[in-house]
Image (cartoon, helix red, strand yellow):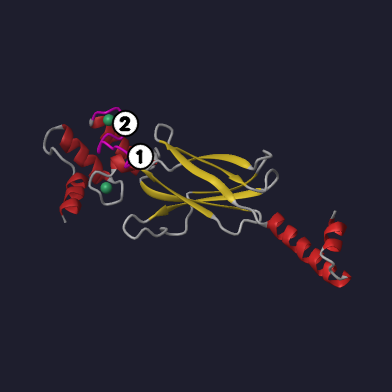
Amino acid sequence: MMKGIFKKRTLKKIAGGIAIFILIMALSTSALAAEIKDAAVTYDKSTNTVTVTGKISTGAGKQVTLLCLPIDEETGEVEGSDPIYIDQITTKNADGSFSVKFKMPDNAAGSYVVRISGTGVSQRVSVIFSVDEPSVLYGDVNGDGEIAAGDAILVLRNTVGLITFTDAQKIAADVNGDGEIAAGDAILILRYTVGLIDKFPVESRANYGGGN
Ligand SMILES: [Ca+2]
Ligand SMILES: [Ca+2]
């Protein structure tokens, strides 16, 4: 077939050699170039889980790398360099499809980017997704929907190292909003339970921020 074409075009032997060489180059380049296609990210609020799906055009047995990073809401730039999730998987399906699940931190809120790359991929794909602010009832450290003395006791137990808090509990416990969980937070919770205050400083702080 090939021979026939060359004959028809009456290419000289040497010219034919160059043409074949170029053809081989083109074939090997296209074999190497891989693309990430149909990339999608879904976030499940109830399980706080992210699922990343997509395809690598080169099929099965290829490495796909995933990196999830927070984005600064104001600048739109990637915030810091600590990834929330980083992984490398090998595609198993002939169509190169993959699906990766990972859990977000308990206090996840805002915008995030998932960067996807892989073997021979020259152009990585970025997918941005957002997570709503977790609904926190400040002072309700045990998460039963009530602010009670028991919550203050949990704070005290935490401050002396008897118990550790989840990320969500840390947010609920820091009622003065100073970034620390201390006896002062427990006292505020107690003051709230006896009606001495009807709001925590952390809530007022949020209001000031909004009103500027
Ligand atoms: Ca409670
Ligand atoms: Ca505090």
The correct choice, above or below, for 7 with respect to 142 in the image is below
Q: Is residue 93 left or right of residue 36?
A: right
Crowding around mark 1 (Cα neighbors within 10 Å: few <14, some 14 to 19, many 20+) is some
> In the current view of this chain or complex, which residue is farthest to the left?
196
Residue that appears at 24% across and 43% down = 175
Q: Which residues are magenta?
A: 132-146
Which residue carries the number 2 mark?
A: 143
The disc placed on residue 180 is: none
Percent from the top left, x then y, of residue 69?
Answer: 46, 52
Percent from the top left, x then y, of residue 61?
Answer: 70, 45
Asked whether mark 1 lies closer than 8 Å to ligand 1, one says: no
Residue that appears at 14% across and 32% down = 194
User: What element does badge 2 sit on?
Assistant: loop
Labels 1 and 2 touching (C-beta < 8 A): yes
Q: Is residue 21 left or right of residue 149?
A: right
Q: CA distance from mark 1 to mark 2?
A: 9 Å
Crowding around mark 2 (Cα neighbors within 10 Å: few <14, some 14 to 19, many 20+) is some
Which residue carries the number 1 mark?
A: 168
Asked whether mark 2 lies closer than 8 Å to ligand 1, one says: yes
In terms of depth relative to the viewer, which is nearer, 125 or 29?
29
Residue 164 within the segment the image draws in magenta: no
Residue that appears at 17% across and 47% down = 204
Percent from the top left, x then y, of residue 155?
Answer: 30, 39
Residue that appears at 32% across and 39% down = 134
User: What element does badge 1 sit on?
Assistant: helix
* Quarter where residue 47 is shown: top left
**The C terminus: image quadrant:** bottom left
Name the residue type under label 1: Ala
